[in-house]
Amino acid sequence: MKIGWRLWLLGTVLLILVAFMFNLESSTSFLILGIGIGIIFALNSIKSKIGKSLIILLLLASMIFLIYTQVEVGVKIKSVDYNSTAYDAGLRAGQIIISLNGNSISSISDYSSAISQEFPSGENKQLTIQTKDNEFLLYTSQAPEITLEEISITRLKFGLDLQGGSRALIKAENKSLTYEEVEDLIAITENRFNVYGLSDMKIRNVRDLSNQNYMLIEIAGATPAELEELISKQGKFEAKIGNETVFVGGRDITHVERSGQYAGIEGCYASQEGEVCKFRFTISLNEEAAERHADITSKLEISQENPEYLSEKLDLYVDDSLMDSLFISKDLRGRPTTQILISGSGSGSNRREALEDADQSMKRLQTILITGSLPYKLEIVKLDTISPLLGKKFIRTILIAGLASLLAVAFIVLLRYRKIKLPLALLFTSFSEIFIIIGIAAVFNKIWTLDLPAIAGIIAVIGTGVDQQIVVLDESKSGISLSLKERLKRALFIILGSYATTMFAMFPLLAAGAGLLRGFAISTMIGITVGVLITRPAFAEIVKKIVD
Amino acid sequence: MSLKEAYNKNYKLLLIIPLVLLIFSFIYLFQFYQQNDDFIKKDVSLTGGTTITIYLDSYVDLGDLKSFLGDKGIEYSVREITSITTGKQEAIIVESPSSSDELKTILEEYFDFELTPENSSTEFTGASLSNSFYKQLLRAILFAFLLMALIVFIIFRTAVPSLAVILAAFADIVMTLAIIDILGLKISSAGIVAFLMLIGYSVDTDIMLTSKLLRHREGDLSSRMLSSFKTGLTMTLTSLAAVIVALLLTASFSETLRQIFLILTIGLSFDLINTWCSNASILKWYIDKKNKRREE
């Protein structure tokens, strides 16, 4: 049995995607690839003795390989609360916990029961957390401040509507935002979410057909209440000396210098632990706040240890948590200043790190000051919270439905052609097509998640795919005196025709409705392209073999 | 008289069936539009409002819940989700134009437990967004339809056959809309997407038919017609089988998928009529006329 290039292409693409789709070590992936290509090679010369023995050998090899393949066990850390015991101990998002105080952990419920065993009462305890590459010791009276997720077998990422989570679409109230304004808003929001220790989130700028810009936030874990609160709070900023408020963000700050000669890194110097870089930038206060500043500082004394500065510091609070404390120059005592120089520093083991740290700190601080002064109120125009409860069941139902639909299709094909080989070939091709589309989704899991619209798209693709395969079948079987090649070429014309119409029909949907249905358009476009380039030619070849 | 002769003689009469259906659909939709100010009934994802899905451990009587919601004086609709394997009630879906907080409070009062992200899903769409959402989806469908029409013209380069393809797709949409309205179904954004899918499926068979009749030369027209009929019927029947099976399996589970598959089932059924009674007849008429002219 000679295998033509079309089947080669299908086989190789399938293998590459299998190797990539599952969460395997790269060596394992290459092994799968090797064995798979070997099998295709062997099939090519199956008539000869060498071919036959090669096939047996390879099948044996793959069986041994399957038995000894280790799937990763443990649970993955999804997020760690900033400044928590867990964080200080060195636990970070992405690490894989395999045991806790000697109890091996392979699921979240394992972890929860191990934790509840350790903390029957609120006394301090030592926890030994073993991760895949390391061991961490925590001395704590409560469960570590981390969220976990199970390691999935595949690299597939499912959308919020399937895996659960919250999604909010946000715009400004009574105002339409420009692209840049939304970018600013995203930077500010990201900053604030980081302050709150929420990390497993995606924030995007989305534009719809009527050129409205929105901010789309998707968070896998958070509750809608948290999300609403974060958005409604808009980052309360307060600068206090002692217990007295000097100025608050937004109302009192008229301007924040972000670049130019009044904002930037001032200089760096060596310290005991490496390098320290200082930054400074100015902000402008309104007169009321300036008076308040004068009033409060006039009551302060000059610091004993630090004669350059006043005895109390200016504390910056964001949503009531302390972000930074700044020294106040002694020259400012009792003076109503509208211009305030805010300075700070960043440190690192070398100059570059220190510079980066200082730059980040400065940007964070500036953002916080502007956060309070968003010139518009935010409005949540869409807020969805999907329970993670049904997700797994849901995916299973869809798989069952997909399988049953394909079998129904195969049954009709069997009725029509009365040959078992043809429906089998059709089923095989459709399965490969689904696999390739899902595999591509796994490759691009950072930018494309499988949500409900995407699954609807895959269903549509399989439907049109089957239609086109029937065209191929009928053209190849028609009793006319053209060569088989010529007949398949005709089938291809029809297929390309419907390819073009579907492809173009999907374009408008990419942008419509703030892109919430983009998954449908993308999966359809990818699917029909895969069909025309890979699976349809392969199917034609299989049919050619069966008919000949 | 054989079936073939009967068809060749009377095929133009077949046009009456789609024509009557189309006229009926138009009249119905026109009336519907006068009453409702739109061609469809929209659900809260397109009008603005809240959908709350509550996953339950124990059975809840829908009638009881409905009368409770009625007493509260809010607009609502209630549905249940049942398991495909056991038929057991798994969840209840409540839709209302009110805000999510309001609906949540009322439901919490009824169920007497707190609705958390663990035991429920909440989807809220603001009225302003859903409004523009709807308009944009309609625009997307219109664009998609126009682009499809353009491609069909480019492929076949002749007016009548291309128009026949476009007419069939258009009739599929209009007739399906009419049935949806008669059934009283509320359309969600997913439902609108289903119409996009319908355009794709509809055009598939029509392109196949037109290619075979217009571009291929071997055999006489009748034999080509018969072979495309076989192919096209298999195409549509497989699609129908697939969507009906999927509809049965997912209907109790996901409103989104239920609506998509239901619309496709209706649309594909009409496509059988619109392809084989209208498109095929128009094409045959066109080709016969062209051949006659060539003979003269």
Image (tube, coloured by chain):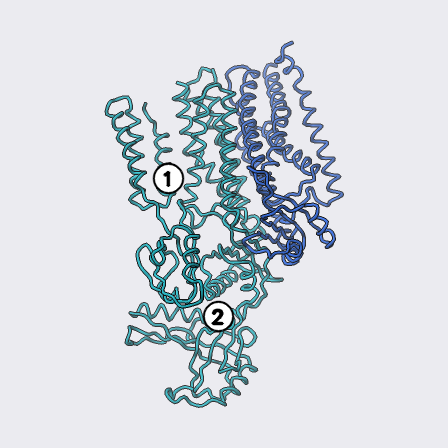
Chain colours: A cyan, B blue
Q: Quadrant of residue A342?
A: bottom left
Disc 1: which residue: A18
**Among the 4 quarters of the image, the one containing residue A382:** bottom right
Tell me the amino acid under the disc marked 2.
Ile
Name the foreground residue: A221 vs A357: A221
Q: Nearer the viewer, residue A59 or A119?
A: A119
Instruction: Please determine if labels 2 and 1 lie on a single subunit.
Output: yes
Q: Quadrant of residue B158?
A: top right
Q: In the image, A305: left or right of A162?
A: left
Q: Secondary structure at mark 2?
A: helix
Q: Residue at x 43, y 45 (%)?
A: A156
Residue A277 % position (x, y): 34, 74
**Looking at the image, residue B39 lies above or below residue A236:** above
Do callouts 2 and 1 mark residues in contact (Cβ within 8 Å)?
Answer: no
Question: In the drawing, what numbered circle is on residue A212?
Answer: none
Q: Which residue is mark 2?
A: A368
Q: Where A533 sits versus B256, above or below?
A: above
Q: Badge 1: few (under 14), some or many (20 or more) residues near its Cα, within 10 Å?
A: many
Q: Which residue is situated farthest in the top direction here? A: B1
How many discs appear? 2
Dot 1 falls on a residue whose secondary structure is helix
Q: Is A56 on the left-hand or right-hand side of A467?
A: left
Residue shown at the point (73%, 44%) measured from the top left: B36
The reply to whether residue B143 is in sight is: no
Question: What separation in Å lies between label 2 and label 1 (alpha carbons)?
Answer: 46 Å
Residue A400, given in percent of the width and then of the height, sits at: 50, 36
Task: Give whichever of discs 2 and 1 has the lower sequence position.
Answer: 1
Residue A244 can be seen, yes or no: yes
Quadrant where the N terminus of chain A sits is: top left
- Chain hosting mark 1: A
